[in-house]
Amino acid sequence: MNGARKIERVVLGDQVYEAIKERILDQAYAPGEKLNVDGLARELQVSSTPIREALARLVAEGLVKAEPFIGFATAPLPDRRYYEDVYSFRGVIEPWAAAQAARSRPGPDVIAALRDEVAAMMAGEPSREYRSHRGFTEADDRFHRIILQAAGNQVALKSYDDLRFHLHISRLYLTREQDVGLTHQEHFRIVDALEAGDPDAAAQAMRLHLEGSYERLIK
């Protein structure tokens, strides 16, 4: 019985977290807006405990700011320089990781996992609402993370995880139209190069994908 109560609480906490995150990414809560714990509890019809737990998770992800004696507020939108710095970093680490992964000749399980993530990206046409493009961006994040894992460098993988850039990129979907067909093609080229064990082709395919992503989202 105690175990059942714990499971219910975890599910509730996740639901509250997702609800607040969705509102932030859709800008129902404007960037920089103060988040009142009691007000959120009334809005979502829950106690303050899951609200505080959700806000703590969102602080760790950079979507919420916490100030002593002030409270919580949605994080401001990252400026253009932030996104440029993210893509500069990715442009160094991810083509290298793709080449490393190709040299190691990833097994069929890795290739299958990558193709599954591309299929997940293709499952729906992302719109400008987070609920719509959430599956797309999360599958994209998992795709790139699998390649970092296959490269076998734990420092590079942690650096990637620490960026949590996919959450901040999600905030751009409110204002940018996406050519998802091009994105799918770019991912398929990366997988094909990895499956062929071709480091140069894998690095080039990743580089072109990141350049295309930058053009579509930032420029």
Image (cartoon, helix red, strand yellow):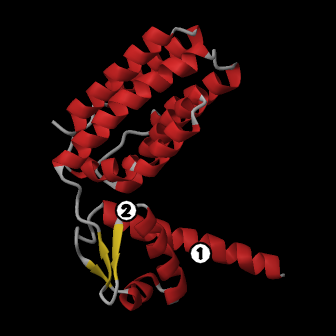
Q: Is residue 37 left or right of residue 86?
A: right
The answer to whether residue 121 of the structure is visible from this angle is yes
Q: Residue at x 58, y 39 (%)?
A: 154
Residue 160 to residue 31: above or below: above
Q: Is residue 170 left or right of residue 32?
A: right
Instruction: Check the image and report above or below for 212 versus 194.
Output: below
User: Could you say which quadrant of the image residue 204 lies in?
Assistant: top left
Name the quadrant containing residue 72: bottom left
The kind of residue tagged 2 is Gly
Badge 2 marks a residue whose secondary structure is loop
Q: Is residue 123 visible?
A: no
Quadrant assignment for the N terminus? bottom right
Looking at the image, how many numbered discs can be counted on the residues? Answer: 2
Q: What quarter of the picture does the C terminus occupy?
A: top left
Mark 1 residue crowding within 10 angstroms, few (<14) / some (14–19) / many (20+)? some
Q: Which residue is mark 1?
A: 12
Residue at x 30% of width, y 61% of height: 26
Residue 25 placement: quadrant: bottom left
> Residue 196 vs residue 174: left or right?
right
Instruction: Provide residue 160's location: percent of width, then percent of height.
Output: 46, 42
- Amino acid type, residue under disc 1 in the picture: Leu
Residue 62: numbered disc: 2
Secondary structure under badge 1? helix
In the rendered view, would you say 4 is above or below 83?
below
Residue found at x 40% / y 49%: 163
Q: Residue visible at 23% across and 67% down?
A: 31
